[in-house]
Image: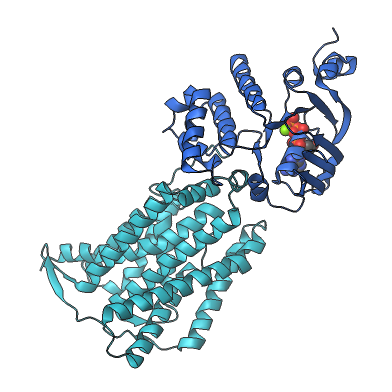
Amino acid sequence: MSFLEAQSLDVRYGGIRAVRGVDIRVEEGETVALIGANGAGKSSMLNAIAGVLPHTGSVYFNNVDLSYRPVFDRVKRGISMVPEGRGVFGRLTVEENLLMGAYLGNSQQEQDTDLKMMYEFFPRLKERRRQTGGTLSGGEQQMLAIGRALMARPKLLLLDEPSMGLAPIMVEKIFEVIRGVSQTGVTILLVEQNARLALESSQRAYVMESGELSITGESRELLHSPEIRRSYLGGGD
Amino acid sequence: MDIFAQQILNGLVLGSVYALVALGYTMVYGILGLINFAHGEVVMIGAMTALAVVSTLLSVFPEMHPFLTILLAGLAAILVCMSLAFFIERLAYRPLRNAPRLAPLITAIGISILLQNIAMIIWGRKYKTVPQLFPTETFELFGASITSVQIFIILISAVLMSGLLVIVHFTKLGRAMRATSESQRVAGLMGINVNKIISVTFMIGAGLAAVAGILIAGNYSVVHYSMGFMLGLKAFTAAVLGGIGNLGGAVLGGLLLGLIESIGAGYIGDLTGGFLGSHYQDVFAFVVLIVVLVFRPTGLMGERVSERA
Ligand SMILES: Nc1ncnc2c1ncn2[C@@H]1O[C@H](COP(=O)(O)OP(=O)(O)OP(=O)(O)O)[C@@H](O)[C@H]1O
Ligand SMILES: [Mg+2]
């Protein structure tokens, strides 16, 4: 069984069926991209895996069936998510936000090391450590959200549009961090509007369309597939 | 004797108790957006439980040191109130977490009536006198007189309120409480067991309410099954005055309301040419409530934070 395995996952909002029987596998250490148009069901998919949204079908992680487990339990088992829109605590300080990420234990010493590491990744956060999260710029909030998720020392990192609303230079920076995290062995499932970037930073990819998977394959190959180029990479060159 | 100084002192004593109760309202509101109208009844249950324990101890161990008696009674009241709040949240409010906001509000009023009736069945309809455990001493302070009970009330309230502020702002539990009140969804993503934090919040509020009940009982020397109703409304007013959801606001609102009431009651006779007497004291709380709701619904310290996770 794969490290992460979602089987016939279904998410409904009242009458709307946003995810329709999707199967996804992610192997340990892999970075897998999930791309698709707006409203395709990508966030719903991630939220279901993280346990924030009720779903049917099953989610296996590290050989454990998490389907009926609450979100905090999935976090305990090593799944962390950076939600769409960042979810920074606006009234907590930057440092408190980061410490929230390490809520489930880790010794004080590990926490201090991790905090130092986050401040090295994102020196801007260090300057702003005593400011409340709500006063940060969008890009700074994104760094904070990623740093906070990493503070949990996750085994699986779910990223929902980490590049959203960021200037190109910031996007570069964020993806540099993501690749660095991947190199430390963390498994990543990445949802991203910027399909090129997503495919360039991952080994495999799933394409979602109206709640279902349409195409899957090696990211390198998908980058050159005419269909993907036409629909997701902007242009038929 | 300086009447004005006396009114201020009385106001501070009364205000400390309002503040303790207001904290319970404001914490629950902050985390659930729910006005827990049963909170006043928890205060009453605290006072009643403590009195029951004191009476029992006095008859069974008449030699017991009064400090030990009050300590045991206090612990029992806190325990009872915390359990009560735990079950109220678990059984009455949690199933309605996603219901329209009116549903838990009506439930809260229902619980409040239920608790009053249970208390009436257990402890009767009559006013009950609280035995004096300590000889009352009176001290002079800035031209006003203050009793040992009043000093005790101010001290205990100050200690508890500071303790709460320290917990909320400087501990991991407090951080989790603040995170949960900002966004339950994101708090869950941090690995926080949101339901547990909500339970703990209710229980902390109930612990403060139990102490407030004992302090009030000690100050007025009588308790009654309906005593929580007016007290609850006033503490709620205090919470709104300070800015509901804001802890510092609840403390400020409580003290201010105590002062307004006390000073108002002291001078209402003069102001109305003797037409209204000091027993119209209760009017002030509701005038304050209406004025705040009309002119500054967010209260004195309430901020409307726009960024929501
Ligand atoms: N809370 C909700 N209530 C009702 N419908 C919802 C809700 N959340 C999402 N949907 C619907 O479910 C579908 C999938 O939404 P989802 O957010 O998963 O898409 P997405 O692929 O993440 O889109 P985007 O790229 O725009 O973020 C959409 O049609 C959306 O309108
Ligand atoms: Mg999305």
**Residue furthest top as drawn:** A237
Name the spot of residue A144 as percent of width and height, x first. 54, 31
Identify which residue is drawn at 51% across, 60% down. B200
Q: Is residue B81 above or below residue B130?
A: above
Q: At which x and y percent is residue A235? A: 82, 11
Q: Colour of chain B?
A: cyan
> How many numbered marks have been drawn onto this rendered protein structure?
0
Question: Which residue occupies 43% across, 71% down?
Answer: B78
Identity of the residue drawn at 82% across and 47% down: A58
Q: Which chain is blue?
A: A
Please name the colour scheme applied to the rendered image: by chain
Q: Position of residue B214 (x, y in %)?
A: 35, 74
The vertical placement of B272 against A178, above or below, is below
> Percent position (x, y) of residue B103?
64, 63
Position of B280 compared to A128: left or right?
left
Ligand 2's quadrant = top right
Q: In the image, is residue A196 above or below residue A10?
A: above
Q: Where the C terminus of chain A falls, by quadrant?
A: top right
Q: Quadrant of residue B280?
A: bottom left
Left or right: A217 with respect to B270?
Answer: right
Please give the name of the residue rendered at 44% of the width and 81% of the height, measured from the top-left corner.
Answer: B225
Quarter of the image that includes the N terminus of chain A:
top right
Observer-nearest residue: A11 or B229?
A11
Can residue A122 be seen here?
Answer: no
As drawn, B48 above or below A143: below
Can residue B85 be seen here?
yes
Nearest the eye: B9 or B189: B189
In front of the other: B46 or A124: A124
Looking at this rendering, what residue extends furthest in the bottom direction? B59
